[in-house]
Image (spheres, rainbow, N blue to C red):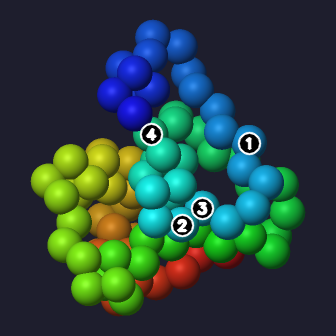
Amino acid sequence: LARLLVFPLPTIAGVNGHMCAAGAMLGLAFDYRIMIDNKNWFFIPALDLGLVYSPGMTSLMKAKVAPHVQRDMILFSKRYQ
């Protein structure tokens, strides 16, 4: 994950399926994400599972996601299509 974040060239993730939990964190590490179709979901279900976000996860979300989207992802486990 750290190598993706500091890679000197732009990184692109081609996603063919849902991006959830650890897969969502991996997807956020890329500079760009392209979902293959509109039937896939992006979400981080830590709240649903009763888990606490680590400081690294929170920092990654702050760096890669708009503040209002981050709030909805963390507080409400909102799913995005």
Of badges 1 and 2, the one in the foreground is 2
Q: Mark 1 sits on what residue?
A: 14
- Look at the picture and state if 63 lies above or below 19: above
Q: How crowded is mark 1: few (under 14 residues within 10 Å), some or many (20 or more)?
A: few
Percent from the top left, x then y, of residue 72? 36, 81
| CB within 8 Å, label 2 to label 3 | yes
SS at mark 2?
A: strand
Q: How crowded is mark 4: few (under 14 residues within 10 Å), some or many (20 or more)?
A: many
Q: Residue 40's mark?
A: none
Q: How crowded is mark 2: few (under 14 residues within 10 Å), some or many (20 or more)?
A: some
Q: Is residue 72 left or right of residue 43?
A: left
Q: Mark 4 sits on what residue?
A: 29
Q: Mark 3 sits on what residue?
A: 19
Percent from the top left, x then y, of residue 35? 75, 55
Q: Can residue 9 be seen in this view?
A: yes
Q: Residues within 10 Å of mark 3 (few under 14, many from 20)?
A: many
Mark closest to the chain's N terminus, 4 or 2:
2
Q: Residue at x 40, y 33 (%)?
A: 1
